[in-house]
Amino acid sequence: MAENNPKKRKKGPLGRLGLESGIRRRWFINNMSVVILILLLVGALVAMFCTYYFYASVQTRLEREADTTSKYLNRYFSSSYSAFYEYGRNLVQSFSLADKMEIQILDESGKVMVSSSGLTAGFTPETGEIARALEGGQVETYTGYDQLTEEKVMASTAPVYYRSGRLIGAVRCVTSLQVLDAQLGQIYLWVILAVALLVALIIFSNSFFLRSIVGPVLHINEFAKKITGGQYGIRLNADYNDEIGELCGTLNDMSAELSRVEKTQNDFISSVSHELRTPLTAIAGWADTIESCLDDPKLAAQGLTIIKKETRRLSQMVEELLDFSRIEGGGMRLQTEPFDLRGDLYDAVFTYTDMLQQEGMRIEYEESEEPIMVFADRNRLKQVFLNIIDNAGKYGKDGDRVQVSAHTEDGSCIVHIRDFGQGIKEDELPFVKQKFYKGSAKGRGAGIGLSVCNDIIAMHGGTLDISSVYGEGTDVCITLPLYQDHTVE
């Protein structure tokens, strides 16, 4: 019916789109956001490493050149200021690395005396590394902007001393960082492009994986909607050799189980309705008959007998339904106590002796001579015995008797209740203890009696086993643990 609802069909594509976009959004937030963050972090680390590496290389080169030159001047040309100035001027004019850096000779105040570029002579650079070098007596480096050209530069200054140890001046090596920054900019661009390419490749490759997930999920979602709409028993045709395939198999099993439960429920309702209607019809009919035939005591007595019998049937059926409801809801509680099972089994046998005789059957009871002590709920066990003996009389009418016996064996109490009727077909035998199952039996009942009995015995830690040969009869074997902590006087 859900498939015939036009409004529901109209919402289908929107729901499908919403589910797909939801999965993709979750995938992007939970997966791709982390991947992109990691790639950006890696890219930033690469850029920082390249910047540090290239700047450190330039700084090392400048400091080495300034330090080497200053030491050479300290050793050979620091006897007088004129010698220092003359050699410094010759050094600047013949400087072989003039295309890569500028070399400057400074006086003791930091003023440029000569320069390889010729542009800064007579100028005093106001950069911090000159003062630190002149005061500290070691090589110092500055990175910033040149006051004259306003371009970014790096400069290293090394002090020069007289042979007496007094400061005479300094050597300063300067290079522009414009080309280096341009190269770093290209590196940054390549890093950005590499990160973007990696993100695009990851998205492109993962889109196939995502499609392989979204497609089956959408298919499963449509399948679940059909089940929600009441289409039990349908199957999901999907061939996946992974967790999705396992999920599809589980959903198919669920659909089949729901179909079975629905059929069982419908059969149960139909069966219970029929079982309740039959005695009610008999009670109502005989009540009318008795009302109209009060002058016939024999007929009235017969009617009252039938009314009592049908009322007893109704009471037993309602009690079974209540017990079934308690067991299913976990509300059944056992009132256990130690007692001799023989007495309660005998009461059950005695209860059905006259009833079976009226049906042309006899009941044979073989009682143990020794006490059979169990720790159990005696009312519930008696209920089980009565139910099974009733079934034996109901379905064993083709036979002439019902046999009941009880004995102990290997620390257990074993009760056999056997009839010699038609028996149970071999293909139906595995299902007779299932809820609502009636098989091909034509007898009355809602199909829950044996299920309730099996659950009660299981709650006592015992077993209820049924064996049958079709055409020869059925044997019900109840096994219960014996009560060990008792004293028999």
Image (cartoon, helix red, strand yellow):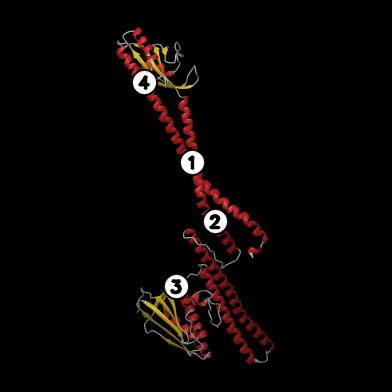
Q: Give the labeled residue for mark 4.
A: 65
Tag 3, which secondary structure? helix
In which image quadrant can residue 483 be found?
bottom left
384 sits left or right of 369 in the view = right
Q: Kindly identify the residue that appears in the image at 50 percent across and 41 percent down.
A: 197
Sequence-wise, the earlier of marks 1 and 3 is 1
Q: Which mark is residue 37?
A: 1
Q: Kindly identify the residue that appears in the image at 48 percent across and 40 percent down.
A: 195
Looking at the rendered structure, the kind of residue marked 2 is Gly
Discs 4/3, front: 4
Q: Is residue 166 above or below residue 40?
A: above
Q: Name the residue furthest right.
A: 292
Q: Kindly identify the residue that appears in the image at 61 percent across and 81 percent down.
A: 278
Q: Kindly identify the residue that appears in the image at 46 percent across and 38 percent down.
A: 41
- The answer to whether mark 1 and mark 4 are in CB contact below 8 A is no
Alpha carbons under labels 2 and 4: distance apart: 67 Å
Q: Give the labeled residue for mark 3.
A: 458
Q: Can you give x and y, in whole percent of width and height, for residue 116 in the image?
A: 42, 15
Q: Give the labeled residue for mark 2.
A: 215
Alpha carbons under labels 1 and 3: distance apart: 59 Å
Looking at the rendered structure, the kind of residue marked 4 is Glu
- The answer to whether mark 3 and mark 2 are in CB contact below 8 A is no
- The answer to whether mark 4 and mark 3 are in CB contact below 8 A is no
Q: Can you give x and y, in whole percent of width and height, for residue 366 in the image?
A: 41, 86
